[in-house]
Amino acid sequence: MATGTPPKTFISDLRPGRVATIEATVSRLEPTRQVEQRTGGLQKVRNAILKDGTGEIAFVLWGSEVDLVSEGDQVRVVEGWVKEYKGRPQISLGRTGRLEKP
């Protein structure tokens, strides 16, 4: 009966320190910027806002991920990593997550 797809979580139910799968709309994209890595060199990073019927969360895209989404896209973040940044939850693909467009 397993489909191989983790059950989705609503944005309002996300908690830092957990892995979650969400389906949402990219409601806003900020400009891509460069950040210095601890190991040296620059990495592209871009913040987006994901929205579902229960709320919004910041979505952080790193490196080649920055070009994967556009405003208005429907996306599924599978096994994304939720953490707290400046007092607010945010989600990223982390090491094991993936981005799907249904």
Image: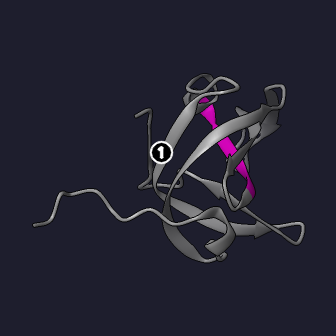
Indicate the quadrant where residue 42 lies.
Answer: top right
Residue identified by numbered label 1:
76
Indicate the quadrant where residue 65 lies.
Answer: top right
29 relative to 73 in the view: left or right: right
77 relative to 15 in the view: left or right: left
71 relative to 64 in the view: left or right: right
| Residue under the image location 79 percent in, 26 percent down | 32
Find the residue positioned furthest to the right: 86
The quarter of the rendered structure image containing the C terminus is top left
Q: Nearer the viewer, residue 84 or 37?
A: 84
75 shown above or below 87: above
27 shown above or below 51: above
| Residue under the image location 61 percent in, 32 percent down | 63
Category of crowding for the residue at label 1, using alpha-carbon neighbours closer than 10 angstroms: few (below 14), some (14–19), many (at least 20) = some
Main SS of residues in magenta: strand
Q: Position of residue 48 (x, y in %)?
A: 74, 39
Q: Amino acid at mark 1?
A: Arg
For residue 16: magenta?
Answer: no
Q: Which residues are magenta?
A: 56-63
For residue 58: magenta?
Answer: yes
The answer to whether residue 57 is seen in the rendering is: yes
17 shown above or below 10: below
Q: Position of residue 95 (x, y in %)?
A: 47, 55
Q: Nearer the viewer, residue 49 or 46?
A: 49
Q: Position of residue 8 (x, y in %)?
A: 44, 62
The answer to whether residue 41 is seen in the rendering is: no
18 relative to 58 in the view: left or right: left
23 shown above or below 19: above
Q: Secondary structure at mark 1?
A: strand
Q: Position of residue 68 (x, y in %)?
A: 55, 26
Q: How many marks?
A: 1
Q: Nearer the viewer, residue 80 or 37?
A: 80
